[in-house]
Image: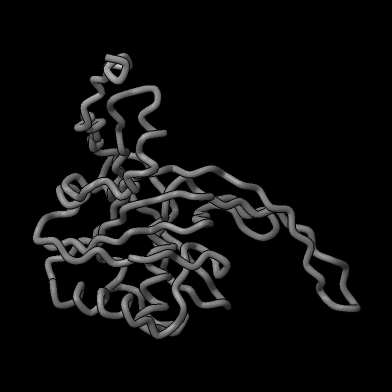
Amino acid sequence: MYTLLLRLSAPLQSWGSESMFDNRETDSMPTKSGVIGMLAAALGMKRNENLEDLRKLGFGVRIDLPGIKLNDFQITEMGEKLNSNLSNRSYLSDAIFLAGLESADVTYLEKIENALKNPKYSVFLGRRSCPPTQPLVLGIRNEELYQSLLDEKWLVPEWRQKTLFRFSNNLLLRIVTDGSSEGAVKKDVPLSFSPFRREYGYRYVTEMPAKIVTREPCSVSTEHDPMSELR
């Protein structure tokens, strides 16, 4: 099996799997339907095209930095004959995720990788207002999904890691993948993105053993004699 790894990071991202209409919540991590939508846009697919090949991809996420949830109250003008529309929308701010797409067909993963590097339509992290930061594509690994997510280095920059280790020398990075026939059930499989008939199916999700990251030991000597200059 082969796994294409993606770095999903942006000032804002939003991954809603349940909410609709005027109250748009976000999940705590990227959804399979949201990522498939991003892939379909990069590939130049129309909204009514068959998504079967994309649905077959194994999917998993590692939470490198969960971010902070933000709530935004929006007013949309609907025209002279309609009242203003009020809505609540939620986002994840400053989050970093490692996402994996698994397939035995490395040629198909290479096609997706090339499309994400040269997208036909704009790609975004859940909503059009959330473009990703670079690098988005980390490459294809010759490993199965979980092992790829486990082995990949921590994506949080070194200058930010110090604050995350304030209260512990070890951190656990959650890893959630597709399940086979057990685990939680989530309505997160896109059957159609057609604006006239959007449909979603269900999938199993499984919490896998987390990746453990450890504080690096200080390599700079802290020994200092404050009186040495006075001798």
Query: Closer to the camera, 228 or 102?
Result: 228
Residue 175 position, x and y percent, is 29, 42
Q: Which residue is drawn at 73% across and 53% down?
A: 73
- Indicate whether 124 appears above or below 11: below
Residue 148 position, x and y percent, is 17, 52
Q: Quadrant of residue 144?
A: bottom left
Name the image quarter holding the C terminus: top left
Query: Closer to the camera, 41 or 186?
Result: 41
Query: As drawn, which residue projects farthest toward the front?
Result: 231
Query: Closer to the camera, 153 or 63?
Result: 153
On screen, residue 3 versus residue 29, left or right, reads left
- How many numbered callouts? 0
Q: Which residue is drawn at 34% across and 66% down?
A: 136
Q: Residue at x 30, y 73 (%)?
A: 52
Query: Closer to the camera, 156 or 86?
Result: 156
- Indicate whether 12 appears above or below 171: below
Name the image quarter holding the N terminus: bottom left
- Indicate whether 27 appears above or below 125: above
On screen, residue 84 versus residue 107, left or right, reads right
Query: As drawn, which residue projects farthest toward the right?
Result: 81
Q: Which residue is drawn at 42% across and 65% down?
A: 190
Residue 72 position, x and y percent, is 68, 52
On screen, residue 133 versus residue 215, left or right, reads right
Residue 115 position, x and y percent, is 31, 80
